Each structure stands twice: as structure tokens, then as C-alpha cells.
Amino acid sequence: MKQPIYLDYNGTTPHDPRVIEAMRPYLEEVFGNPSSSNWYGRRPKQAVEQSRGQVADCLGCHPEEILFTSGGTESNNHAIKSIAGSLFARGNHIITSQIEHPAILEVCRFMEGHGFKVTYLPVDARGRVSVSDVEAIVTPKTVMISIMHANNEVGTIQPIREIAAIARANGALMHTDAAQSIGKIPADVNDLMVDLLSLAGHKLYAPKGIGALFIRRNINASRFCHGAGQEMGRRGGTENVLEIVGLGTACNIARKDLDANRAHMERMRNRLELGLTGAISDVRINGHPEWRLPNTLSISFLGLEATRILEDIGPDVAASAGAACHADTVTISHVLKAMNVPEDWAKGTLRLTTGRMTTEKDIDRVLEVISTAVQKLRA
């Protein structure tokens, strides 16, 4: 059966063939426990540390500042629950934004139930946090500011460096969820001035179930998962060697091929955007026109329902919706709500995201399919 063209790379990515090849020995023959001192544990131990170095090189940090986790969600939990939580005696205020991923918002709501006060900053119509808003709300009680590097729905890139400077000046830690930005835009932790950064393997052509958290080495991070002392004593549990190798390889590729991959994804995204806006009336683009991920297109079709469009194009195109429609109700994403996108536009929003494997032929076919579907539904 013919597969639909994949345009949901912000949802997850396929495995890069080079990642699969790097992982293969650890699936087929190298099975030792990296914590073991015997012969079988040596190669897995070396592989884990080599991968740690590859992730560190990608982020511009020291290998010992990389903690392997099960993914972006665990990294975010560790950053906020364990690290911000350990600072409760000094302050109980956390700043975040209204458009964060649930892996941040739900953790912040949990912290509110444990004595913390959380400020959820608004964004402008393009999805950007105001630096002046951060400056106005930070207090001596603020222990952490957590703002995503780039939004998963509309692709808007946040002014992380400027916000981090405010955090540093006020003695607060700066965390960013960079799951969507690694491999698409530069994410050097020193350039961004962040203290903590989360990443997820399955967003950059590595497997699901693996991620990492950058923790600047001057931070006294409490233990997140108690056990036998793996991951420098911070996260117990036998290391997931197979997927750690995959993440390290993916980060190495992301670092070396960043410029070429970014240019390709942006070229495919622009071809798609220009084609849709040129062929279809009453459409709008959501997100910042300049500060936006090179692969992300959030597009709204006036008067239509995204779920109906997806149903129609489903056999040919795999994408995501910005709103869910059930009977007479419409559930609009919290991101579009925060951006104050009018409901008659928001309910017809698709997220189309390109990737390394996207071709011009794919885009031209998608243009034909979506244009036909929109015309049919409007008729």
C-alpha cells in the first residue's frame, strides 16, 4: 500500500540510516552492562561516554554536563521538580509561558500544588514572549525561568539569550526546552546563556525513549532517580546503551550537517507555503515571519475544520491539526489561544513540518492534494 507523504516531523522523526547502523552492534552482539568491570562491560561503557561527548559537542558544553534521560518529558521534569524544587528554601517562584509543551505546563501545575507560585507569561500575536514582561515579573523569589527555545506548533523562536540574561542578573536559573530546535537551528548553551537544556532523541532522527538534560556544572543537582548510582549518581538504572548510542550519533549528524539540513528544510517549507498561499484564498500563516523554525508551517484555512481537512487528505498526506472538532464543539490548541488567533481561523489550522527526507516531488504532490481538498470542502 502506498504510504502518505510525511509532513509531521515536529511530531516525531524517522530513524536516520546512520543512526540505525551505529546502533546495530548494540542490538546484535554488544550486550554487556556498562557498569560491569568485566570484559563485556568495557565496550558499552566506552560507547556511553563517546555518545555523551557527541551530545556535548552538539550543545557546546562539557561531557560531564550531560545527563541521559528517557526523553524530553523526563528532562523537563528533572529540571523543574528536582532542580527548581531543591531551591524552595531560597525562593518559590517559577516563570514560564502560556505556550509551553504540556511536559512543562503540567509539571508547573504540579509545583503549584507543592508551595510554588508560577507565572505563565502571555505571548504576542506571533507567539513570542516579551523580554520586558519577564523583566517586570522577576523577583528575588524567582528560582527558575523556563521558556521553550522554539514552539512545536507554530515554530516561533524565543529570545532565550535576552531572557537568560535577566535570569542571571536576578540569581535565577534559566531552563529551555529545546526538543524542537536541535538539528534545525543553532543551540549552543553558552551562546544561549542557559543553565539547563532539555532535548529529545525522537525529534532529531534518533529513537523514542532517549533524551538528555544539560546541567551546567556549577549547579548542585539533586538525585532524580535513586538506584545504583549511574549517570554520575543523579539517575539510577542501567544505561540504555543502544539508544544512547543512537542519540549520540544523531547529535553528531545534527552538528555537522546543521547548515545543509536547515537550508533544505527551509527550502521545502517555503515551497509549500508559497504554493498554498498562492493557490488558496483566505489563508493565514501563524508564527513569527522571521524568528521561526526553518521547517515549520502553521497555516489556517478560514471557515474550515482542520479535522475535516485531515480526513480528506489522510490517504496522501500525514500532518497535524491545531484544533480538534467534535460534534458542535471545537477545541483549539492552547498555543493558538494564547496567540489570540480568532476561532474561525484557528479551527482550520494545520501544522505541516518538513524534514531531511522531504523532496520537491513530495511538496508538489501535497500542494495538489491540499488545494483540491480545501476547494472541495469549501464548495
Image (spheres, rainbow, N blue to C red):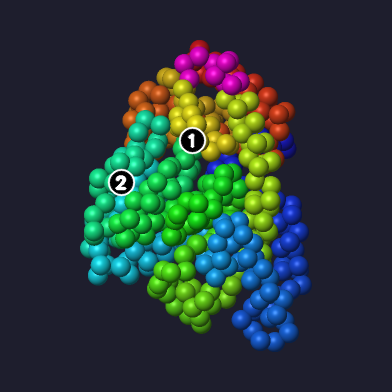
Indicate which disc, 1 or 2, sits on the residue closer to the N terminus.
Answer: 2
Q: Is residue 366 above or below residue 83?
A: above
Is residue 307 visible to us here? no
Name which residue type carries label 1.
Answer: Trp
Quadrant the N terminus occupies: top right
Is residue 252 visible to us here? yes
User: Would you name the residue on which mark 2 appears?
Assistant: 134
The answer to whether residue 308 is magenta is no
Most foreground residue, 124 or 59:
59
Q: Residue visible at 56% across and 56% down?
A: 59
Q: Position of residue 106 (x, y in %)?
A: 35, 54
Q: Residue visible at 39% across and 37% down?
A: 128
Q: Is residue 178 above or below residue 313?
A: below
Q: Residue visible at 40% across and 46% down?
A: 162
Q: Secondary structure at mark 2?
A: helix
Q: In this image, 259 relative to 21: left or right? A: left
- State which quadrant residue 93 falls in: bottom left
User: Would you name the residue on which mark 1 appears?
Assistant: 291
Most foreground residue, 234 or 349:
234
Magenta stretch: helix, strand or loop mostly:
helix
Q: Position of residue 292 (x, y in %)?
A: 50, 36
The answer to whether residue 282 is magenta is yes
Name which residue type carries label 2.
Answer: Val
**Magenta extent:** 274-283
